[in-house]
Image (cartoon, rainbow, N blue to C red):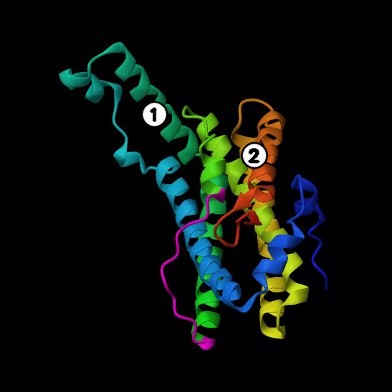
Amino acid sequence: MPVDIQPALDFLKCPTPQEWIDEAIKQDNLEILLIDHANNELKAAQNAMSIIRRYGSAPQQRSTSRDIEKDSKHNTFTEKKAASTALNLMYRYTEHFELLNKMSRLAREELRHFEQVLAIIKKRDIPYKPLSASRYAGVLRKHVRTWEPARMVDTLIIGAYIEARSCERFHKLAPYLDDELKKFYLSLLKSEGRHFKDYLALAEGISEESIEERVAFFAEVEREAVESVDEEFRFHSGVPA
């Protein structure tokens, strides 16, 4: 049964340029594509775990206001206010079970995808060589706000864009690939589409205000990253130089 990825396509501001598709299906670049895909799956799992670590701290790791005040080196109004904010966030996000559950599930799925791509790389005798990361994620993340909960909201919105773009590229690439890769990439559409929705729903649930403005902002940033020229070919790179 075909997977409906229209919500992910509608979420994106632009389609992947055909020039990128033409570059991706070249034999040398197909090897780079698979290696970078594996790296991206691992990074996605690591990002989910990072969110769990940052916003799911165990109760016994929390400090109390009294403990903070005992440390004379940090006994300033600004630092106590920052510490108090951090404590409040720890309680808030530890109790946000939906965030922790979604990120835990996502991390497991991304690691499974990582293993699947590795198996294909091994089967095809492709050397699993180091690759530099594309500028795509960095372009998005440099706009993340530095205070909470805005930082968390932006991080989740970016996660939604990365998953939606991955879903779109799997879908666009599939018709040009051999049967094995085509079947594999089409099998990923359901999970990538779900991940995009999960990230967006979590951002809406955590934000203290409407996220429409930030979603629109990152839509333009993401569009610029996809439509601008990139010197190196990667899974999330822009138009080939």
The N terminus appears in which quarter of the rendering?
Answer: bottom right
Res. 215 mark: none
Residue in the picture at 54% in, 34% down? 143
Residue 157: give x, y in percent of width and height: 62, 41
Q: Which residue is mark 1?
A: 86
What is the quadrant of residue 176 in the picture?
Answer: bottom right
Q: In this rendering, would 135 be left or right of 190?
A: left
Residue 154: give x, y in percent of width and height: 57, 36
For the stretch drawn in magenta, the main secondary structure is loop
Residue 126 on the magenta segment: yes
Residue 77: give x, y in percent of width and height: 30, 12
Q: Which residue is mark 2?
A: 221
Q: Nearer the viewer, residue 147 or 16?
A: 16
Residue in the picture at 36% in, 22% down? 82
Task: Kindly identify the amino acid type of the residue bearing the numbered disc 1.
Answer: Ala
Q: Nearer the viewer, residue 171 or 29?
A: 29
> Is tag 1's residue or tag 2's residue first in the polypeptide sequence?
1
Magenta stretch bounds = 123-136
Residue 180: give x, y in percent of width and height: 67, 84
Residue in the picture at 66% in, 79% down? 181
**Which element is circle 2 on?**
helix
**Which element is circle 1 on?**
helix
Is disc 2 surrounded by few (<14), some (14 to 19) or many (20+) residues within 10 Å?
A: some
Residue 236 appears in the figure: yes
Residue in the picture at 69% in, 40% down? 219
What is the quadrant of residue 27 in the picture?
Answer: bottom right
How far is mark 1 from mark 2, CA to CA?
29 Å
